Structures are given as C-alpha cells and as structure tokens.
Image (cartoon, rainbow, N blue to C red):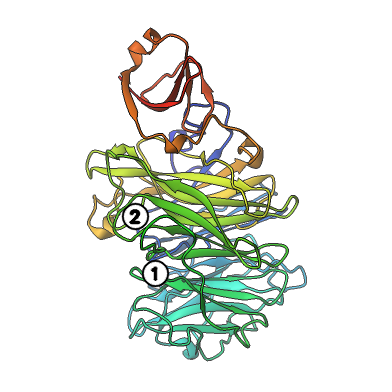
Amino acid sequence: MKPLFSYSWMIVFILLGTGGATTKIDTIGTTGVDAQNYGPIWQRIVYLPGTGIYTAWVKTGMFASFYSFTTHTWSGEVEVFGSQRNASGSLDVPKDPTSPYYRSTFISSFINRNPRWPILAVESIPGTNNFVMRPPDSSLMGCSRAPIAFTANNWLHLLCVDSATQDTLLYSRSTDYGVHWSLPVSICEGIIPANPTYNITASENSLRIAAIWTNEDSEALWLNISEDGGTTWTGVRNIFPPPTTISNPKPGKFGAYGLFDSADRLNIVTQVWNGTNQNPAEIWHWQENRNPQWTLIYRFAPSSVLAPPEPGEPFVVRPSIGFRESDASLFALWLNYDSLNYEPQTQLARADLFIAQSRNNGINWSHPYRLTGPDAYSRLSPCLAPEVGESLYIITIFDQIAGVYEQGHGPQTTNPVCVLRVPVSDLPGIEEKLPGRLNHYFHTTICPVSQLHLLPDVKLYSPLGRPIEKPTRSGVYFLRQDNQTLRKVLLVP
C-alpha cells in the first residue's frame, strides 16, 4: 500500500553513538488516542512465519492492518467493528493448520456504553482484513475490557471485569471460535483490588492458560493458572515482589505481560517501582519452575534527571516479551523515558523503545539496546510480537507531542502507528563485554563539543558502551582518559 505519510515519517533509525543498525519502520495507520490501554500492554501484534504480520490498535474503536509476506504490502488500516461504538481490545490468530480459521485474525473489544458488552470480530478470509462481527453473546453482558487468547485446541479464552463493580475478575471461553461463550466465572477467589489491571496468555502447545492481575496501589502481582483449558484452576498465588532493592515495590497499574515458551514454561515481565518516585525503576523477568524465579533485566537509577516522564509512570514501563524457538532466546521490550530529551510544550520526557535478550533462559540479560530516538517523537504503547524469527516485530505509536492527551497532558495530535522490524543479528548478546556498567556512573561532567579535543588521550563511548571516534551531536556519553575510570559526560553545543 502507499505510505500514509511521506518517507520522512518512515525513518531508518541508527543507534545513538553507533552506526549501521538496520531497523525498518513502516507507518501502517494513524490514531489520535494516546491512552491505548488502561494498564498493561495487551497483545496487539502477531508474527506468523511464512504468512505475515497481524496488527491492531485503538483509533475510533479498534483498527487493524495486515502485512503479507507474499505481496510484501500492508493491507491498509481497517475499522474492525464498523459503526459499532467500541473501545480497547486485543488480537490473536489461530496457528493450528487444521483449524478452519487458520491464519485468520480475531480481535476483541467491548461496547463502550451501558450495558457494556465484550464483542469479537473475525477475519472472513485470512489476510484480507475483511472482518465480520460475531453477534454479542448475552452470557457476557455487563462485562468490559476483554483481552483474548487461543490455546492449542483452538479454544478462545477471555478475561473481563464486572463493569458495574470493577471488583471481580471473570473468565469465559468459547469452543466454537467466539459464536457462543460459557457463563463467566470468577477466578480471583475474592483476591482482587478495585479497578484491577490484568492480562491473559495461553499456550500454543497445550491447554495452559494464565491470568495475571494487580492494581495501581497493590504490592502484589497475582497469578492463576489453568492446565485444562479453563475447566479448573490451580489457585491464586502472589508472585511479588522480586528481590529488588527498591523499598515498598509495586508493579503499578501497568501490571504484567505473559508468554508460554516452546517448553510450555510461563514467562512474565513487569516493571518495579514504589508507586510514587519515578526512579529508581526496574524491569524484571519471572519464570515458573526456575531457580531463581525472578531475574533483573534492567535498572534505571540516575543521580538526577532533567525532565520527568508522564505523571504517574516510572521511567521504565510497559514491558512485553518474545521467544525464539530456534535457539530458545528470550527478548524483553520496554518503554524508557529519556530525561535529556524533553517536549518543550509539556516539559515531559519523551519515551523510546529499548530491548534486551537472554540466551540462557532468562538467567542473564544483555545490556539494553536502544531502538528509537532520541528525536522529536515520544513512543507509546509498544508491543513485541511473541514469536521471534530472524527479526523482532514491534507495534508502537509515534506521539508528536509527549504527554498523554486523555490525562490532560498536551494537545491531541494525529500520530502515526508504526511497525518496527529489528534483525536479531543487530542486538548485542549477553557475551558482549561493554566497558563497565555505564548506568551506575553518577558523576556528570559538562563539556562543550568544541572543547572535547582539548582533552588528551580521551576515549569516548555511547551509553551502550560502543566506542565513538568523533561525536557529531550533543548528548550523554562516557569518557575514559588515560585508561582510567569511566566518567559520564554531557556534551553541549
């Protein structure tokens, strides 16, 4: 399809302080909605090898686009539910070749008026982006905010909340691709806070399902697993907190994101902060039946910041996770606010995408790799496709003015919805040795770029630890002089 914007919108980004990264960015649609989801990231992108890339996002209701590996084109953005007023939802695709809906997109949402009601749309022919809305099932009346997921037997599962009380987490399933739904049942055993934020993930290799939830003020992250496609549940347990040094740690309203890998192990990623101070903040990984169950992916703990992130959010937030079966690698993506790159209109830090990978089952993680910026855009609501091949596929919003419009921070803008293709070969591995743990250096030297040459025997590194011969722009770097200790340096014009 013809791009919705001129080529200047479809930038090929390079890493800060490095060269040669081959991240490709396609603009697939637009949106004026900054708050794409209340709480954690829900699945909004699926990569199916040999077929294509399936995407969904919120505009005036749910929209979708499909990229075909056969034609090498995007289908164009489509309004999934037509004129039916609807709100946020998620996406999944049956991957069983024996299914009559193999490779067809399923997208959930809910009727955004009383009575609230989960709804589902199905692609009539795979890859056409032609959707047919299923008649709403009366069993689900009064429920809202319903993410979906398929198990290996092609049953479709959803979570939702009672829209009146917002204090009961309900589960329902469909064995006929969303035509009929079971009566919703509570799976939280009464252990649920008000206004919960939650997620669902299901296995492509078995009947395992996981429900994960918390809320803005809770110091818990609850988990309930079904081993038999939602017939019975093992019981609610709190897997929080990880062994963090942050006092009174919380996952916050941004909750968590889950994935079953090819060995059918449940993997969960979440942010950790104290709910008040926006830093320090961390990204952690949890895996069942592993010792230790929690491992740290990334810690953001600067000594000072120039601009804050979105109010009520930590500096690192909304992680998602992917898995590559060929070498059992895990990949974690998150949103990272850059306090040195702020929006003049709102005085808020702009956000970029960072990723790390693990090649040993999440025990160790690579240094973070910056995928976007710094530039004049702020990224919103990123989601990593759960299956990874030679490349990672990521959907995100490029916000022209940092700040969530729906929360009164900045004006509303029409922003591009983008998909990033990131070759895995571009990412630093866990074995790559960088010069020190750069984010642990707190003393900053301010130096004009024009005077850098006055310092003899200086070696300069990017924040990722890569050597730089001649910096061409201002920003944060790391400096080593006479092979001595690293120092952080802020180069100014």
The residue wearing badge 2 is: 32
The residue wearing badge 1 is: 219
Find residue 247 and report its image quarter: bottom left
Q: Which x, y percent locates residue 463? A: 46, 32
Against 18, residue 273 (above or below) is: below
Q: Which x, y percent locates residue 123? A: 60, 68
Amino acid tagged 2: Gly
In the rendered image, is residue 178 in sight? yes
Q: How many labels does the image show?
A: 2
Against 368, residue 214 (above or below) is: below
Against 424, residue 87 (above or below) is: below
Query: Which residue is rendered at x = 52% and y = 81% of the image?
Result: 236
Q: Are marks 2 and 1 in contact (CB under 8 Å)?
A: no
Q: Which residue lies furthest to the right in this view?
A: 98
Query: Which secondary structure lies at badge 2?
Result: loop
Query: Which residue is rendered at x = 45% and y = 47% of the image?
Result: 299
Badge number at residue 377: none
Q: Which of 100 and 151 lies nearest the eye of the viewer? A: 151
**Label 2, label 1: how far apart the Cα atoms are:** 33 Å
Q: Which of 14 and 448 lies nearest the eye of the viewer? A: 448
**Is label 2 or label 1 in front?**
1
Q: Which of 29 and 353 lies nearest the eye of the viewer? A: 353
